[in-house]
Amino acid sequence: MLSYRHGFHAGNFADVLKHLVLIDSLHYLAKKDKPFCYFDTHAGAGDYALDDAFAQKNREFNKGIGRLWSRSDLPDAVLAYVNIVKAFNANAKLNRYPGSPLIAQHLLRQNDRLCLFELHPTEIKSLNQTTFKDKRVRRFHADGLTASLPLLPPPERRALVLVDPAYELKNDYRLVVDALVKMHQRFATGTFLLWYPVVERRRIDELERALKKCGIRNIQLFELGIAADQPEQGMTACGMIAINAPWTLAAQMRQTLPWLVGALAEQGNGFCRLETLVDE
């Protein structure tokens, strides 16, 4: 299925969490002079106009980046995230939201590289237009869960892989675990970030059990809920699972996640989870 278009959801609370973790992880990798490669298995269009029909339909950004845009009390990690989004907007007005590829492109250095995968025919056209001038970027009209494998490990021997599928099909929860195992077998020292939505808690419980049994070590979970689990309400929470995360990430999220609950949750019903699924 190829019906998912991220433009409907750009800048929502799930993007806030995903991009906070991504930015913190990329900043950490960039502390060393050695170059690294960024892989995005489901890159999307890369750039989203918040005044177009997709974003305006439900205006999900109002409950995500919109609630953070003008605040003066942002924690350091949230401030870094908001400042990056502001770099893509003129006159301090929120009109545009950069997806993961553009955020990574903004942060990576001259000798770093980006490998971006997108299967949707319309989204890949937009991604090509957005990034075609950057010689650091390779774009692939393909499913990154499988097409990225031959490129691992990268020549740099340092990389971050973001796995961010649409979860349109129920077996996607199993497929991402299978893909992570194969990626890790080829490149055990890489950093892997897996985003997931909480629509049915049962599926997340199954995902966590599968990861605990898969043989990979050093797995952490960071989850943000804006409402209690309610399957009939759509996505009420989301999470990031990190394999070989920067050692600073857990401490950063311990400070940041509770603050985000207060800033983004609906009617005081939010929550957060910070857990080590598998020790080092």
Image: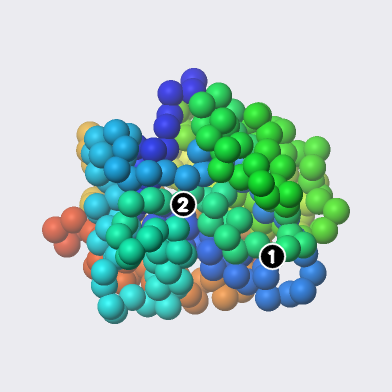
Quadrant in the rendering for residue 65: bottom left
Q: Where is residue 205 in the image (x, y as percent from the top left)?
A: 44, 44
Q: Residue at 40%, 51% (x, y): give it.
A: 97
Q: Which residue lies furthest to the top in this view?
A: 1
39 on left or right of 169: right
Mark 2 falls on what kind of element? strand
47 on left or right of 110: left
Mark 1 falls on what kind of element? loop
Q: Residue at 39%, 38% (x, y): give it.
A: 7
Q: Which of 19 and 191 is in front in this view?
A: 19
Q: Position of residue 221 (x, y in %)?
A: 49, 58
Kindly identify which residue carries mark 1.
109
- Mark 2: few/some/many CA within 10 Å (<14, 14-19, 20+): many
Q: Earlier in the sequence, mark 2 or mark 1?
A: 2
Kindly identify which residue carries mark 2.
98
Q: What residue type is labelled 2?
A: Pro
